[in-house]
Amino acid sequence: MIRYLLPLVMLAALSGLLYVGLGLDPSRVPSPLIGQPAPDFELRDLHDHERRLTEQDISAGGVALFNVWASWCPPCLDEHPLFMDLAARDVVPVIGLNYRDRGEDARDWLARHGDPYEWVAADPEGRTGIDWGVYGVPETYVVDAEGVIRYKHVGPLDAAVLETEILPLVRRLQEEAS
């Protein structure tokens, strides 16, 4: 009897874990980088190949949003108007990381849809994205004035998340930095 009960108990436990896992919100993936300095990188600027960009450039102007995107990413286009609005309102600098993309495709995409970014680092092989813990594009990080990652959002941003979570955090961090 016990030899039949043990596999049944294991199957029930595994089923329970699977059920809980499938119910989780993928945009709430915890990141071990929260509270840690932004990972080191040195990449070429998407628009100026002579310019080299590093993680220190992200927070050079204070608190910033670091948005990982690609021209081949449909959800990136969905969230793009929010970044265009932020850039127009000058609320917080938006920095881009163009992930696993061809430079000419990325530049054409920005020319077509608008460029809200202060600058864009080109990561054609995706190594920097991996260092940042990118699961897929788009992803957005809040980086404070000291270069520490304070927030990570997986998936496309929507107005509700931006207004209720990200912008209040940005304002608080901006006040702390001044």
Image: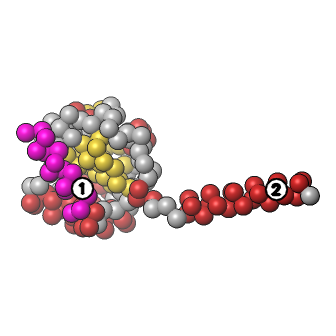
Residue closer to the observer: 68 or 178: 178
Mark 1 or 2: the one toward you: 2
Q: State whether residue 115 appears in this view.
A: no
Residue closer to the observer: 21 or 98: 21
CA separation, marks 1 and 2?
46 Å
Q: Which residue sits at x=11%, y=55%? A: 91
Whole-percent x, y for residue 68 in the image? 32, 51
The residue carrying mark 1 is 166
Residue closer to the observer: 80 or 133: 133
Residue closer to the observer: 170 or 117: 170
The residue carrying mark 2 is 7
Q: Quadrant of residue 128?
A: top left
Q: Earlier in the sequence, mark 1 or mark 2?
A: 2
Q: Which residue sits at x=56%, y=59%? A: 21
Q: Amino acid at mark 1?
A: Ile
Q: Which secondary structure type mostly characterizes the magenta part of the structure?
A: helix
Q: Amino acid at mark 2?
A: Pro
Q: Check if residue 177 falls in the magenta segment.
A: yes
**Is 23 positioned to the left or the right of 52 in the image?**
right
Whole-percent x, y for residue 134 in the image? 41, 47
**Is 68 positioned to the left or the right of 91 in the image?**
right
**Is 18 positioned to the left or the right of 23 in the image?**
right
Q: Check if residue 174 falls in the magenta segment.
A: yes
Check contact, mark 1 vs mark 2: CB within 8 A: no
Q: Which residues are magenta?
A: 163-178
SS under mark 1: helix
Q: Which residue sits at x=14%, y=51%? A: 171
Q: Quadrant of residue 40?
A: top left
For mark 2, does the 10 Å Cα neighbourhood hold few (<14), some (14 to 19), or many (20 or more) residues?
few
Q: How many marks?
A: 2
Whole-percent x, y for residue 157 in the image? 30, 62
Residue 59 to residue 74: above or below: above
